[in-house]
Structures are given as structure tokens and as C-alpha cells.
Amino acid sequence: MDIYKVICFLIFIQYSFASRVLELTDRFPEIRKDGGLWLVKFYAPWCGHCKKLDPIWMHVAQALTKTNIRVGKVDVTRFPSVANEFKAYATPTIKFIKPDSEHTYYGDRTKEAIVGYALRMSGPPVQEVTKSESINNFKNMNQLFFMYVGKREGPLWDVYYSIAVNMQPYVHFYSASAEIAKHHIKIKELPTVFVHKEGSHYYYPVEEGSRIENAEHLNKTLHQWISEERFETFPKITSDNINEYMQTRKYLVLVIVEENKIKQISPEMLEFRNKVEHLIRKKRDTYHKYFQFGWMGNPYVANSIAMTRLPLPYLLVLNSSTYHHHIPEDDPPQMTIQAIEVFLEKIMNSTSPVYGGNSIPVNILRKFLNAKRDLEDMWHGNPMMLIVIFTLPSIFFLLIIYACCCADILDADEDEEEELLFHEKHE
Ligand SMILES: *[C@@H]1O[C@H](CO)[C@@H](O)[C@H](O)[C@H]1NC(C)=O
Ligand SMILES: *[C@@H]1O[C@H](CO)[C@@H](O)[C@H](O)[C@H]1NC(C)=O
Ligand SMILES: *[C@@H]1O[C@H](CO)[C@@H](O)[C@H](O)[C@H]1NC(C)=O
């Protein structure tokens, strides 16, 4: 008897160490009111993307054990009321839940991105830096961050803080005193705001005169500047995080290449990607206001936008407010730097032809074409499967028709068989 208790105990310990993810039930809305911070995944047992997230979620939970953030999951098929309460209509949905507010996560579904998000959300909107070395740490982590320098008071501080409250899910906001910041940057005036990214920093531009006095104007311009600066110059964009980039309200310029299973890109595609990257880094000041650049490692989203199977590598420009897109006239790999520049300039002066959009007919067509492309992919990947899927129902259908029309023959057959069995048993 005792040995069983020991075994049970060991299994219990094993279990609680292996799985730090709490399985939540319909009592969660009550529990959540007790306070504390929660990172919760809403999932359905049959959803493929949820399954992919499972191992990542375990690692996220492990990485957050020493924090005050609890990691849980809700099976929405068993507890639809909880999913409803938290407006988790798609699976998987990741939410950061505070006692009095909830936030949906839209970023990459990688351990690093999710853990970074949870840590950011668990702190205050603007974290005060009190040690000079901390700034070095942020820089070494290659982290993009905004920093306010000066006394935490006055119109610039108020506006900075209110923007940080809204944008905390996406990016880090810090503040530091001039004494600490001066070890890292040249300070021309106080207070000031700068962004640090890719090894450089850029100041929030000073307008002559009325910058600090007019709070509304300040709010608008700082907001605009932060939403333009909060992304790296040439990030990898995925189907998970593309919505974040669409919120910039700029044109999204996408270099589409294809990564293989071990994230390698063919030399030809790499050459094209490098060409575009080189151009946009050189002409950052010209393009930065209008375009957010990025590259994608597979053509799926781009195909869906362009409603065709694009040759790779490709260059696609997406209007983030209307969902229209622009495509170059020439074959992208053949484009010279100058041709790419002309293509972008034509978009800037609205003379480039416009395609697609997000109207209902276009979306229906898009769904149809996506389905068609999926079938084609299936045909190339696994033709037998496709044949089975399409022929099995027809075979059943034929059998049913056969059964209805030729019922007599079937009956006769069955009778004979039964008789046969009967005879056999007697023998
Ligand atoms: C800044 O503008 C936003 C709306 O764009 C508003 O929600 C926010 O309260 C404003 N903040 C300040 C400090 O005026
Ligand atoms: C998108 O299209 C609209 C309508 O044509 C245009 O006004 C806007 O400037 C375009 N660009 C962006 C980045 O939204
Ligand atoms: C737009 O830009 C293209 C490329 O630089 C140029 O050839 C064209 O004349 C411009 N059109 C207008 C109306 O400015």
C-alpha cells in the first residue's frame, strides 16, 4: 500500500515540474479577479496551429516560472463561456490578463517574442532606468526601445506616458534622468525622446517653436513618430505578425523569398533580398516616411494578396489602409536598383497601377483562389490523397444509387449468402 503512495507522490511531483501550464476551467473568470497576472492561451484540441504552439507554450511557462506571471490554457471547446468572456474568438488566441484589463497578443509565436511580451506587459508602461549599465544591457540585447530623457513631468512626459500605455504590448518604453542618459547619448535639450535600433539612435525631431506648448499637436506628432519608428528597418514578416505592420498605415514593401526547412534561402533570392535591403538602408530618409519594408520567408500570404502564384523572389507593395497592392512591371530578379527606385517613386506619387483591395467580391475571389491553390499544392505533394478525397464520395454515391435501383439483386445476393452460412454451420 505504501509503495503505491510513494509512486503516486513521485508521479505528482514529476507532473507538476514538467507542466507549469495550468489547465483553466470556467472558474477562471472568478479566480482572475483575485489579482495576479496571467498569460493565457485559448485553444481547441483539433486546431493545427494550437498543436504547433504546445511545445512553445511549455517553454514559455518554464521561462516565466520565476516571475509573478502565471501561464495557463483554456480549452474553448469545453469552456466556450470563458472564451466568450475574454473575446477569444479565434484559436489559438494568446491574452495577457491583468486584474482590470485584457490584451491580445498579435506578435510572432516564438518563445522569445512571447516571453518578451509577457515581461513587458507585467511592468509599468514606462520603466524607469536607474543604472547606466542597464542601457548597455538593452543595447547588447539588440532590443528596439524608446527612451524619454528628463524629469518625469510636463507635456512631453504626459504624452509619452499616454502613448506608452497604448503601445506597451508592442515595444519597450523607458525613461532616464539626464545624468544617466548622458553616458550614452549627446543631449542637446531637455526633455527629449529617442529611439534606439540597429545600433543607432534617432531623436524625436524638434519642430521650431510650438513643440512643447501645444499638447494636442505634440500628441499627434509624437504618436506618428513612434508608430513610424517602432519597427526595425528590414524585419522578417510572418503571417502571425503582419497585422502589426499593417497598423503603421504606411505602404508595406515586402520582399518575398522562400526558406527551406532549415531556414536557408537560395543564392538568387538572397541576392535580390540584399539588393533591396541595401537600397532602403541607403535611402532611409527618403522612404522612411512612406514605406515599411520587410521580407517574408514563404509566399503563402503574398500569393493570397496577389491572388496568383507569384514567381520568386518577388516584390509586393501593400497599401495598409485599403489593402490594395502594387506590383512591379518587370520580373523582380531582373530589376536594377534604379528600376526599384522608380517603382517606389511611382507608388509615392500615386502613378503606379493599383490591384486587389479588400472589397467583398475581391475577398470571395481570393478565398476561391486560395482553395484552388491548396488543391494544386496537394496534387503536387500527395496526389493519391487528393484522388482518395475526391473519388471516395463519388464511389459512395454510386453505391447508394446502385443500392436504390438494384435493391432486388442485392437482396437476392444477401439471401444466398445467408443460406450458405446456414449450410456451413450445419455441416
Ligand atoms: C493623445 O491622443 C490619443 C488619441 O489619438 C488620446 O487617446 C490620448 O488621450 C491623447 N493623450 C494626451 C495626453 O492628450
Ligand atoms: C492607400 O490608398 C489610399 C487611397 O487610394 C491613399 O489615400 C493612401 O495614401 C494610400 N497609402 C497608404 C499608405 O495608406
Ligand atoms: C512619378 O514618379 C515617376 C518615377 O520617378 C516619374 O517618372 C513620373 O513622372 C512621376 N509622376 C508624377 C505625376 O509626378
Image: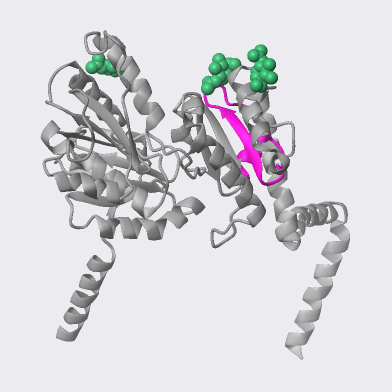
The quadrant in which the N terminus is found is: bottom left
User: Does the magenta-highlighted stretch encompass residue 313?
Assistant: yes
User: In the figure, 297 relative to 320: above or below?
Assistant: below
The quadrant where residue 279 appears: top right
The quadrant where residue 420 appears: bottom right
Left-right relation of 145 to 35: right
Residue situated in front as seen by the camera: 245 or 43 = 245
Q: Which residues are magenta?
A: 299-324
The quadrant where residue 79 appears: top left
Residue situated in front as seen by the camera: 185 or 393 = 185
Left-right relation of 35 to 323: left
Q: Residue furthest bottom?
A: 427
Residue at point 77%, 74% (across, down):
418
Residue at point 88%, 56% (across, down):
406
Left-right relation of 247 to 120: right
Q: Position of residue 125 (x, y in %)?
A: 21, 33
User: Does the magenta-highlighted stretch encompass residue 275?
Assistant: no
Q: Position of residue 327 (x, y in %)?
A: 68, 31
